[in-house]
Image: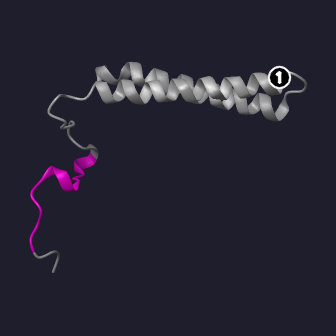
């Protein structure tokens, strides 16, 4: 999980900026409302950058690591014929 450290920090920074911007827009007076709008906008840009960074860290074959708690998705194994009895 070391390779996810960078996108994780970017995601935390984006959410922090968005929350700070919303706080400035709600509680700020005068020009602080505009500063809050810019903080939210920059937070959204950093969030998009974090999603792109996480997407680029995937292995080339497109498979991810093991699922937590042994959970399985549809793509993990062959489809069952006939459904559940």
Quarter location, residue 43: top right
Q: Position of residue 37 (x, y in %)?
A: 72, 28
Total of numbered circles in the picture?
1
Q: Main secondary structure of the magenta part?
A: loop
Q: Is residue 44 left or right of residue 51?
A: right
Which quadrant holds the N terminus? top left
The residue at the point 81 percent across, 35 percent down is 26
Q: Residues within 10 Å of mark 1 (few under 14, many from 20)?
A: some
Where 32 falls versus 26 (above or below)?
Answer: above
| Residue range of the region highlighted in magenta in the rendering | 69-81
Q: Is residue 17 left or right of residue 28?
A: left
- Which residue reaches farthest bottom? 85
The residue at the point 20 percent across, 56 percent down is 74
Where 76 falls versus 38 (above or below)?
Answer: below
Quarter location, residue 45: top right
Where 23 falls versus 83 (above or below)?
Answer: above
Query: Where does label 1 land, which residue?
Result: 32
Q: Position of residue 23 (x, y in %)?
A: 75, 31
Q: In the rendered structure, does residue 74 fall within the stretch colored magenta?
A: yes
Q: Is residue 46 left or right of residue 64?
A: right
Q: Is residue 60 left or right of residue 24?
A: left
The residue at the point 28 percent across, 44 percent down is 68
| Element carrying mark 1 | helix
Q: In the rendered structure, does residue 78 fall within the stretch colored magenta?
A: yes
Colour mapping: one colour
Residue nearest the observer in this picture, 42 or 16: 42
Q: Position of residue 64 (x, y in %)?
A: 21, 37
The residue at the point 15 percent across, 81 percent down is 85
Quarter location, residue 59: top left
């Amino acid at each position: 999980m070391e390779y996810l450290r960078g996108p994780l920090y970017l995601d935390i920074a984006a959410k922090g900026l968005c929350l700070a911007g919303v706080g400035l827009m709600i509680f700020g007076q005068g020009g602080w409302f505009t500063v809050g709008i810019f903080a939210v906008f920059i937070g959204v840009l950093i969030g998009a950058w974090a999603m792109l960074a996480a997407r680029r860290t995937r292995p080339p074959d497109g498979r991810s690591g093991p699922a937590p708690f042994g959970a399985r998705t549809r793509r993990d194994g062959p489809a069952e014929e006939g459904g559940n009895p």
